[in-house]
Amino acid sequence: MLAHDAGSGMFDTGLDPGFLDVLEKHFDGADRVRNMVSILRRGPIAPFLSWHSGCPAHTSDLLKFHTQEYIDELVQADASGGKKLDKTTFLNPGSWGATLLAAGTTLSAARHILDGRGKMAYALVRPPGHHAHPDRADGYCILNNAGLALQLALDSGLTKIAVVDIDAHYGNGTAERFYQTDNVLTISLHMKHGSWDPSYSHAQSGSADLTGEGKGLGYNLNIPLPNGSGDAGYEYAVNELVVPAIDKFQPQLLVFVIGQDSSAFDPLARQCLTMEGYRRIGKIMRNMANRHSDGKILIVQEGGYNISYSAYCLHATLEGVLNLEAPLLDDPIAFYPEDEKYAVKEVDVLKKFWRESIPFLKDI
């Protein structure tokens, strides 16, 4: 997966304006994943982990989520040497193989749980996937890794799966695919970012009114949080909104979609989570899995673009999921003054909205 070269340019656009001597590597660079691997292999959490290899996804796997036309487009783009898929997403030589491996590794992690070989698994994959739509790429994402795993779980016979996505950006591709179904509850906590592409602005915005359609009405829950919500704001949102929704839904499997771009030092977001915030959320997710899905939890990697701090926050997240009593790593840089009152106000408004408009949550 390190072979995916997302390119260089001004920020993440691949553009050279002609007046900068130094162009940045794309934010989704291989180094961020190298550090994630190394901190898990050599950091203090290493004794608690075992490692398994993934394998590339097959076309038959991909067609469970993506359209044939889109897969044909990607195969052709790879054969012709690459293609700009959208304004920030690039398929370059080496990218298609990496993308197939990311999708296949996520499926391997899901099968590890579904086949009864373990109750928890983490898919450390790149490129990310939760923005990828059934028929197009979006926001660095080419194939929807978590979405493929969700479909696999449904095909295996599960009838109720909950997804909690804490990446800083709305998991719009995953939401689109399951927007009209009531057997997948998608919950996304993200910053109030609006749309990053005006061609499909509202569906991409992650606003609270995007609650599903038809049979799926009420089963797509968005929690857009103010910039700078921080550890206390996120923990309040999880306890007041996420936990009651999952308690009502009672899933057979919990899929925890993580992105460290919600951290205090990420270049693409301003949510100000620290290691302690990630650790607390990880613990809550583990408790939810213990309560409802017999401890079964699949974790899927998405964003996180500060090369060092993302790795530290990943370490803390998994400490929480493993329910370790004391932190194994101190936070090296994250003293950051918090003011959670804006997040608390937004969460209380959302809770009232859910009670009035989401039938199965009318009494949370």
Image (cartoon, helix red, strand yellow):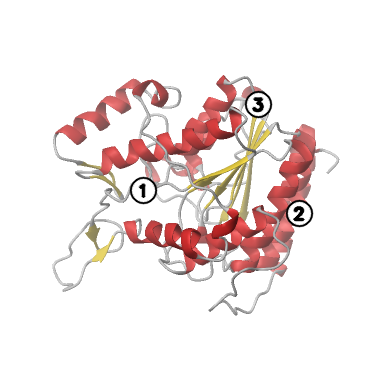
Labels 2 and 1 touching (C-beta < 8 A): no
Asked if one can make out residue 29 in the rendered structure from this viewpoint, the answer is no
Q: CA distance from mark 3 to mark 1?
A: 27 Å
Q: Position of residue 315 (x, y in %)?
A: 55, 61
The correct choice, above or below, for 38 with respect to 77 in the image is: below
Asked if one can make out residue 210 in the rendered structure from this viewpoint, the answer is yes
Labels 3 and 1 touching (C-beta < 8 A): no
Using residue 82 as the reference point, say whether residue 111 is left or right of it: right
Using residue 308 as the reference point, say whether residue 251 is left or right of it: right
Q: CA distance from mark 2 to mark 3?
A: 22 Å
Q: Which residue is mark 3?
A: 183
**Dot 1: element:** loop
Q: Position of residue 178 (x, y in %)?
A: 56, 29
Q: Amino acid at mark 1?
A: Tyr
User: For this rendering, which residue is in front, 196 or 182?
Assistant: 182
Q: Which residue is mark 1?
A: 140
Work out whether mark 2 precedes mark 3 in sequence or the reverse, and give the earlier one.
3
Q: CA distance from mark 2 to mark 1?
A: 30 Å
